[in-house]
Image (cartoon, rainbow, N blue to C red):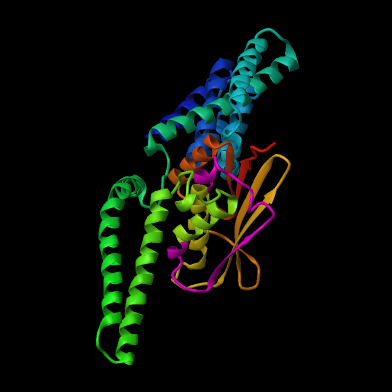
Amino acid sequence: MYPAAIALCALVLGLTSPLAPGAGVLSAAAAGGLFVLHRTALALGVTAILAAGLLVVPGALASPAFWADIVLVAAAALFPRRWAPALLQASRWSWLLAMVMGSLSLSLYFILPGLAASVAVIVASLCAAFVGAGIARHLAVVDARLLAWGDGGLVEVTRDLLLGRITSGMLHDLAQPLNVISMANANMDYIIGHLDIDDDHRRQLQERVKRIAAHTEGAAVILSLFRWFGRNGLDGGADLTVRSALECAIAATKSNVRHHGVAVQLRGNALDHLVPEQHGALEMMGVAALLSAFGSFLSLDGKKLRGDVLLHAAMTPAHIVITVECTDDDGRPLPSRRIDEATLWLVEQVAQEASSDFRCLVRDRQPVRFIIRLGRDDI
């Protein structure tokens, strides 16, 4: 409903732009909204009707506002959508600058003569398209129904979010029986050591006790991962480094790999860099990237693929740059599974709050590399 209403506005306002250039500027803003909402069919339909209007609407051929609307609506349909996050993550000053420039350009259209007036209305339309895209993005976040939030729809995303909320409250309930099992296992080990049985039977019982202890410790590690996930802290007060954040992310997501043909490699000269204020954010960004990366090793027909997940952390004069990408057995790049829009937007906001950046490079509509940039606080 919303995309259709925006498309209708772009069409009606665009058709009236030869007589009212201000309406053409508003039509350009609607074109920016269509680009963000990724409604290719609607944008192409509006483009076709506006193109036909060149032959019907009086003054359309000589109207720069009309031509600007046609070009911008066509761009909304054909412009690569993978560039949308980069365009819409501009600084706040750029939005203010676009609004001021658009208003001034529209005013100059009514003052300047000839070619200068045409340039002014085209600049006003470009600024309006940029601002319209930003407004549509904001409204899409406020009302999640505007975007395709995932293959399972909004229900799946909401279920995952609520599951995370209730998990934090269940950790204590899980820790208590785990402690009881650990103490009971220690008591069993003591009793077995004092039983009057042969050595072979004693050794078998002690091996079982050790196996129970190992599984109990593994469960305790998992609980610790839940407890500290996304927080700037670790059990035992260990140093909060890039390496520890990525290792926590790997430990939290490795169960998503259902076979043993996938290896994870940590590389780079920035792994030991301290990130005490960004540790939790880096862990969350790493989990998002790894969940997508691990999905690349299972084909659509269920076939298990072998390969490597490469995490490289490099230090630049101003940032810590971490890349996550997948390769197959032959070292060739392997596309990752797409991240749903809800998760991607949330992770982007987490990155911004931590003075960081989270980008997903897309090729042929498939993620091929994730880039995480952390602003250095030691300079």
Picture quadrant where residue 63 is located: top right
Picture quadrant where residue 377 is located: top right
- Image location of residue 318, percent across then percent down: 70, 39
Does the segment drawn in magenta span residue 338? no
Left or right: 174 as drawn, with respect to 224: left
Say which residue appears at 59% left-offset and 16% top-offset: 21
Say which residue appears at 27% left-offset and 71% top-offset: 187
- Image location of residue 194, percent across then percent down: 27, 81
Q: Nearer the viewer, residue 252 or 126?
A: 252
Q: Which residues are magenta?
A: 254-282
Left or right: 160 as drawn, with respect to 353: left
Q: Is residue 167 above or below residue 112?
A: below
Q: Quadrant of the N terminus?
A: top left
Q: Is residue 106 above or below residue 232?
A: above
On the question of residue 85 being in view, the answer is: yes
- Image location of residue 203, percent across then percent down: 34, 86
Q: Nearer the viewer, residue 325 or 184?
A: 184
- Image location of residue 243, percent across then percent down: 58, 54
Does the segment drawn in magenta span residue 268? yes
On the question of residue 41 being in view, the answer is: no
Left or right: 163 as drawn, with respect to 122: left
Q: Quadrant of the C terminus?
A: top right
Say which residue appears at 35% left-offset and 71% top-offset: 213
Say which residue appears at 38% left-offset and 50% top-offset: 227
